[in-house]
Amino acid sequence: MNPKDEAHLSYDPLDDTKVWDEQTYPLIPVGKMVLNKNPENFMEQVEKVAFSPSNLLDGAELSDDKMLQGRANIYSDSQRRRIGPEFRKLTINQQQDWTPANQITTGEGRYVEGNLKELL
């Protein structure tokens, strides 16, 4: 859908409960996924996979869909807890010639000495 079409619709096209008319907005094939073998190491190749909408290729960006934006933030927290804080450095979670970006984009992280029990 062209973003300019959004203003002329009687519904919010980013509402997850709405279905777009496929005659007006036909589905566009974007690729093909071929599953041609079973994983050799299930734990390393399946259990540690961290799919996330925030893992974007260069030139791609998230839409204004609120559900998608929420998932982009929540998935990394969930994966950090499920797989560990270094989940982005695992080979299975990297594409070739890619390095994970830090999500802190401005300023420096704040170091607090001690442990949580002392702070509370």
Image (cartoon, helix red, strand yellow):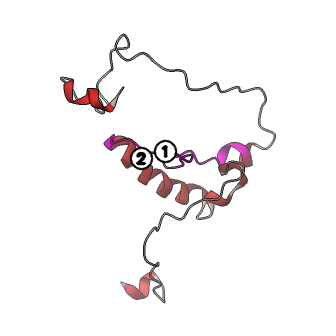
Q: As drawn, is 21 to the left or to the right of 107?
A: left
User: Contact, CB < 8 Å: mark 2 with mark 1?
Assistant: yes
Vertical position of residue 19 compared to residue 87: above or below = above
Query: Tag 2: residue type?
Result: Arg
Q: Position of residue 83 (x, y in %)?
A: 60, 56
| Residue placed under numbered mark 1 in the picture | 53
Q: Position of residue 100 (x, y in %)?
A: 60, 59
| Residue placed under numbered mark 2 in the picture | 71
Q: In which quarter of the view is residue 90 placed? A: bottom right
Which mark is on residue 95? none
Identify which residue, 118 or 19, lies in the foreground.
19
Vertical position of residue 37 compared to residue 40: above or below = above
Q: Earlier in the sequence, mark 2 or mark 1?
A: 1
Provide the major secondary structure of the magenta segment: loop
**Could you tell me which secondary element the residue under label 2 belongs to?**
helix
- Name which residue lies at 37% across and 17% down: 25
* 62 in the magenta segment: yes
